[in-house]
């Protein structure tokens, strides 16, 4: 499987339209997404009499991509650019699975300029059977490595939290099926997949437990590439309808508009830090007027927790000891929550794309 992915990347490097690791991964993922969806569709059509794929028949992978001697060259380029993408970008959101497909393609892009090279990539992808448990598990490991490799792709590295960090935080929080778990800035879905692994290992014993677990997950991601990566990651982890992975900015909503019904039992997240939000976002947080992303997310997380809800959050070192808004946030955190634990992480954890130290904070509302 690793050799297959490496071969695909080597083919893409020959294409003049694909520039850099982030574009190669984006190109790779929308193709794998269509193959995974199609393999899942075939399994669902076999097990459910009333199931219909959300993707129109002529755009399903099996009907245009699976034949190794199928369309290629300019014909393939025209099909992808003039039929596949325009249709999936405007796909009617009649079911949650259709919404997933549309949300992935809304901001996806075909970077490849050579139809011949694209056919070579497609033929390699067609070799993977995502209905095979062993092949899916192997590809899942490769996929996680690809996400890890994004650390070397400039600012794309912000999408990945090291596996050891997510595993430690999930272990301490010990999520259970039925507890509503949210990641307010989910990136590629590391906390979500780690939480699902934890629950499947310790608590999921019956199909009903699995259904309860999946229905209790919530996630939001603002940027198009990590949203697509996260959605595909969910499919790889046996989530049939990850429509709960929303493509949105949780900070774009007034803090006061989050109602009690929307509050959650648990938050696991590594919000972006070191950045500034666009003008006007600070007006959604009248008590904490700042454009610093990490500070706004901390205020939002406190608001989103139910009574006795818990959160584990990665924040920059010194977040609780700054002046101005940070002082107000610290006071808010200590009066509204039971701040339980601060774990200081080594500076090297988030290198090479972040040199500042980080803390994990665990708070109980």
Image (cartoon, grey):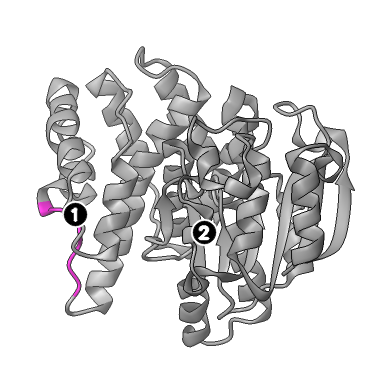
For image coordinates 36% across by 53% down, the residue present is 36
54 inside magenta stretch: yes
317 inside magenta stretch: no
The 10 Å Cα crowd at callout 1, few under 14, some 14 to 19, many 20 or more, is many
Q: Tell me if 41 is positioned left or right of 146 in this view.
A: left
Which structural element holds mark 1?
loop
* Disc 1: which residue: 55
Pick whichever of labels 2 and 1 is earlier in the sequence: 1
Q: Is residue 194 visible?
A: no
For image coordinates 73% across by 26% down, the residue present is 352
- Nearest the eye: 293 or 272: 293
Q: How many labels sit on residues?
A: 2
Majority secondary structure of the magenta segment?
loop
Q: Tell me if 73 is positioned left or right of 292 in this view.
A: left
- Tag in front: 2 or 1: 2
Q: Quadrant of residue 173?
A: bottom right
The magenta segment: 51-57
Q: On the rendered image, what quadrant is the C terminus found in?
A: bottom right
* Dot label at residue 256: 2
Please state the horizontal and vertical placement of residue 137, each as a whole percent of the image: 54, 58
Which structural element holds mark 2?
helix
Q: Tell me if 362 is positioned left or right of 152 in this view.
A: right
Residues at marks 2 and 1, CA–CA distance in whole angstroms: 39 Å
For image coordinates 21% across by 37% down, the residue present is 85
Please state the horizontal and vertical placement of residue 191, each as a whole percent of the image: 63, 56
Please state the horizontal and vertical placement of residue 323, each as a whole percent of the image: 82, 37
Q: Is residue 359 visible?
A: yes
Please state the horizontal and vertical placement of residue 34, each as a whole percent of the image: 30, 48
Outermost residue toward the front in this view: 286
103 to 273, vertically: above or below:
below
Q: Tell me if 258 is positioned left or right of 84 in this view.
A: right
């Amino acid at each position: 499987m690793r050799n297959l992915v490496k071969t695909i990347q080597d083919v893409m490097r020959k294409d003049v339209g694909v520039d850099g690791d982030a574009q190669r991964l984006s190109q790779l993922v929308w193709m794998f997404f269509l193959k995974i969806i199609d393999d899942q569709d075939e399994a669902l059509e076999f097990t459910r009499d009333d199931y219909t794929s959300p993707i129109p028949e002529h755009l399903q992978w099996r009907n245009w991509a699976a034949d190794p001697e199928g369309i290629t060259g300019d014909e393939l380029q025209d099909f992808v650019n003039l039929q596949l993408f325009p249709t999936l970008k405007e796909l009617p959101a009649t079911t949650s699975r259709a919404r997933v497909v549309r949300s992935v393609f809304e901001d996806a892009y075909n970077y490849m300029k050579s139809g011949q090279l694209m056919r070579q990539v497609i033929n390699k992808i067609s070799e993977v059977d995502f209905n095979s448990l062993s092949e899916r598990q192997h590809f899942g490991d490769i996929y996680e490595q690809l996400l890890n490799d994004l650390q070397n792709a400039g600012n794309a590295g912000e999408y990945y939290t090291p596996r050891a960090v997510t595993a430690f935080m999930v272990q301490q929080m010990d999520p259970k099926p039925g507890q509503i778990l949210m990641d307010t800035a989910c990136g590629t879905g590391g906390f979500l997949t780690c939480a699902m692994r934890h629950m499947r290992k310790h608590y999921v014993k019956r199909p009903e437990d699995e259904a309860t677990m999946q229905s209790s997950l919530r996630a939001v991601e603002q940027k198009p590439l990590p949203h697509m990566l996260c959605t595909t990651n969910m499919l790889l982890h046996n989530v049939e309808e990850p429509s709960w992975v929303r493509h949105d900015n949780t900070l774009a909503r007034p803090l006061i508009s989050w109602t009690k019904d929307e509050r959650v039992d648990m938050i696991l997240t590594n919000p972006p830090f070191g950045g500034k939000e666009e003008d006007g976002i600070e007006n959604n947080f009248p008590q904490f007027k700042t454009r610093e992303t990490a500070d706004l997310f901390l205020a939002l997380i406190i608001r989103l927790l139910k009574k006795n809800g818990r959160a584990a959050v990665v924040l920059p070192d010194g977040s609780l000891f700054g002046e101005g808004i940070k002082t107000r946030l610290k006071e808010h955190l200590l009066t509204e929550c039971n701040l339980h634990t601060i774990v200081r992480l080594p500076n090297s954890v988030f290198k090479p794309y972040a040199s500042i130290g980080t803390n994990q904070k665990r708070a109980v509302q």
